[in-house]
Amino acid sequence: MSERHDRIVQRLTAAARQAMQQALGVDADPDVRETSDPRFGDYQINGVLPLAKSLKKNPRELANQVLGALDTGGMCLAPEIAGPGFINLRLDPAWVAAEVARRTTDTARMGLGPAEQPQSVVIDFSSPNVAKRMHVGHLRSTIIGDALARTLRFLGHRVVGDNHIGDWGTQFGILIWAWKHHADPANLEADPIGELERLYKLGSEQAKGDPAIAEATRAELARLQQGDADNLALWHRFVAISRAEAERIYHRLGVAFDTWHGESFYNDALPGVVEELKAKGLARQSQGAMAVFFPEETGMAEQPFLVQKSDGAFLYSTTDIATLQHRREAYQPDRIIYVVDVRQSLHFKQLFTTARMLGMDAVDLEHVGFGMMLGADGRPFKTREGGTITLEALLDEAEERVLPIVREKWPNASDAEQREIASAVGIGAVKYADLSQNLATDYKFEWDKLLAFDGNTGPYLLYTLVRTRAILRENEARFGEAFVPSGEPLTLVMDQEKELAKELLRFGDVLDRVGRLSRPHMLCEYLFGLARKTNPFYAACPVLRAETDALRRSRLTLCAATAQTLAIGLSCLNIPTVERM
Ligand code: ARG
């Protein structure tokens, strides 16, 4: 049995598995879970029931045998059998008191060690397209991908965050042509990305209306692809403008990448991809184009994966296959996560199936698809005039909405300080609203809800953190020295503090689950639940005025543990914290 105590479900699973092996001679999944109803204890072993069914044995009898062999290493009180054959486990209060205290001495990690099997993980996220301003649709990929990257890093995995920008393709023929005929140098100076957007729009409109212009844009594209120096220089310039624009926004969001291998990075590899697919008999000609065909059992027999058009051009799909090959060689990943709009599901299903057909079985490929951000009216999020809202405008609005509240609550702070807090709270609130949603569903973006200081919001969590830290500071002011958690076991008197202590101990399991399932909203839910448990605790348990010194230190330890847990959780989500609020 593993000796680690920092993941309770994991540890109880190991203990229960061993007990089943010993008592019943079978290796089966004990299915250990946190209970949803406290009457059934804190944790449950549910795996005996299905096992009894398959062995055609009496489940309660089997449960009894498992119970006899179960050794929780002092974590739990004597287990009980419930219902048809569940085993209920209750944490031993003495163990809880010692374990919380032990973890709290580790300020930076709350006693949480790395995952048992550190992996190499590539996360493909954000990935906007060149020559367009980032809009709110890119917000989700950026924020979710960043939160996953940070959580996985905290768990000890090696993570490569890659911004797979769309920096190649037909749009450049149009853009180059429009540039050569309509560029406005003054506007380029004043609003570079705006000028690119204007040119692109103008170019595509004119190409649509005039076949000769359409032909000319294609010729520009062909010249770019053949390496024409002028066109290449223009292309470089466009990419640089877009990148500078994107970097500004990443900076505001506090997001960074390890690599920016855009689509163009793979250009030279594309002919080889198609050759390999042909040689392996996976791709064949179809109406002049080249496509990968899937067997019946994939359910995609009618949906071939186009990898080369009849005019010889390669596609998004071809690039993604090349990207996969590159990542395999460069990082030997155990797992690759694509954080991309759920509307690209078919593309990824095709890509992953192709990868398996090419023999890439060793790597877990995962599409983390997310839904759309909707306005309060339930329709796609738009400006009042009906245009798409840029990410920049959204972040500006978040800050503007928070600033007056900060000014009112904290009139004596300097303007710079007020702005800094407003920015952290506002941007944090936007991020939290996004991360706390169930991923695949569309969600409504409502300013009043996400900025509220109560409910499952960023501001509420920040407020709870600030309030908790304030108690620690006040203790220092009153007793003349900073509180340092000593590891001395807690004194748990009231139910409210027992509840809080047990909730704190769930953190390791939650983080593991978030990392394993790529579901940041589970971390949000946990942090929200933890924050909510502090209210009854503060109401029922005086901290600074506790009856004894030992009780005060114990409650201060709970405050420190709560603050540390919230801070680590928010840092995994990359929500900036503030000192006052
Ligand atoms: N640039 C693409 C888009 O905006 C997203 C790219 C996602 N990553 C990938 N490897 N396909 O739709």
Image (cartoon, rainbow, N blue to C red):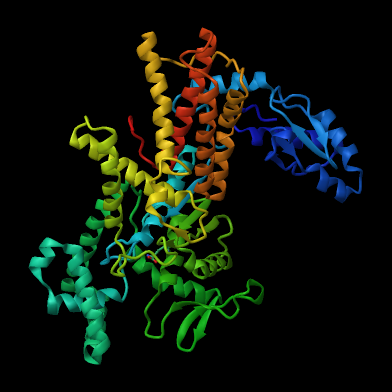
Q: Position of residue 478 (x, y in %)?
A: 37, 11
Q: Is residue 22 visible?
A: no
Is the N terminus in the top left, top right, bottom left or bottom right quadrant? top right
**Residue at the location (39% across, 50% down)?**
448
Q: Position of residue 132 (x, y in %)?
A: 27, 66
Seen in the picture, residue 143 relative to 33 is either above or below; the reply is below
Is the C terminus in the top left, top right, bottom left or bottom right quadrant? top left
**Residue at the location (66% across, 30% down)?**
2
Relative to the observer, which residue lies in front, 150 or 314? 150
In-image side of 213 versus 376 (left or right): left
Q: Position of residue 386 (x, y in %)?
A: 31, 70
Quarter where residue 115 is shown: top right
Determine the residue located farthest toward the left in the rendered image. Answer: 186
Quarter where residue 378 is shown: bottom left
Seen in the picture, residue 153 relative to 276 is either above or below; the reply is above
**Residue at the location (75% across, 41% down)?**
30
Quarter where residue 387 is shown: bottom left
Seen in the picture, residue 575 relative to 207 is either above or below; the reply is above
Q: Is residue 368 visible?
A: yes
Relative to the observer, which residue lies in front, 516 or 474? 474
Q: Position of residue 143 (x, y in %)?
A: 40, 51
**Residue at the location (33% across, 55% down)?**
260
In-image side of 534 versus 272 (left or right): right
Image quadrant, ligand 1: bottom left
